[in-house]
Image (cartoon, rainbow, N blue to C red):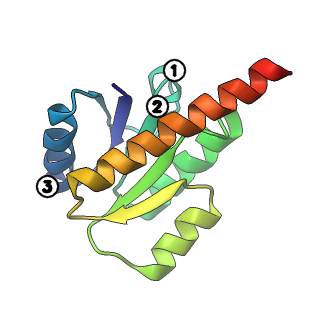
Amino acid sequence: MAKVVLIELESAADGQICRALAIDRHRVKHHWHSVVTRELLDADIVFAGGEPARYMSLLKRVREVHPTLPFVVVTRVPETRVWLDALEAGATDYCATPIERRQLRWLIESALLAALASYGCQAQR
């Protein structure tokens, strides 16, 4: 079970993601502002949407204090330029709605495996 934070997603995407995550019993929190909080930093994965300037600004601030937090940008329409901008800014991944449950599962499993690998590397030091 993962701790998932959803930030400013459009209502249709938010509902779709929440329903899919509930099936797999993930813990979901909504974060409705562009402030980096302990709750946000304690997440296993973040899905952020809304205006590009807002999620890019939040992503930049998150990367300053938590460079490895999985941060997925979610948009309504897939656009190559937005995808590339998000990845260049440090997003872990990018997806457009509708998002399939298996895609969410893959994103979350990848985030959890990366976190385990990161902790393993830190423990060996």
Kindly identify which numbered label has been placed on residue 26: none
Q: Quadrant of residue 21?
A: top left
Q: Residue at x 24, y 64 (%)?
A: 97
- Above or below for 123 versus 108: above
Give the side of residue 11 with respect to residue 119, left or right: left
Q: Are marks 2 and 1 in contact (CB under 8 Å)?
A: no
Residue 59 screen position, x and y as percent: 56, 48
Distance from disc 2 to disc 1, alpha carbons, whole Å, reads: 12 Å
Of 58 and 22, nearer the camera is: 22
Label 1, on which residue? 38
Helix, strand or loop at label 2? It is loop
Q: Are marks 2 and 3 in contact (CB under 8 Å)?
A: no
- Above or below for 2 versus 75: above
Label 2, on which residue? 44
Label 3, on which residue? 12
Give the side of residue 94 with respect to residue 84, left or right: left
Of 53 and 20, nearer the camera is: 20
Residue 63 screen position, x and y as percent: 65, 43
Distance from disc 2 to disc 3, alpha carbons, whole Å, reads: 23 Å
Helix, strand or loop at label 3? It is helix
- Tell me, yes or no, if residue 8 can be seen here: no
Helix, strand or loop at label 1? It is helix
Mark 1 or mark 3: name the one nearer the start of the chain. 3
Q: Residue at x 46, y 29 (%)?
A: 40
Amino acid under disc 2: Asp
How crowded is the residue under tag 1: few (<14 C-alpha within 10 Å), some, or many (20+)?
Answer: few
Q: Quadrant of residue 52?
A: bottom left
Q: Residue at x 33, y 40 (%)?
A: 6
Q: Are marks 1 and 3 in contact (CB under 8 Å)?
A: no
Give the side of residue 32 with respect to residue 15, left or right: right
Residue 102 screen position, x and y as percent: 26, 52
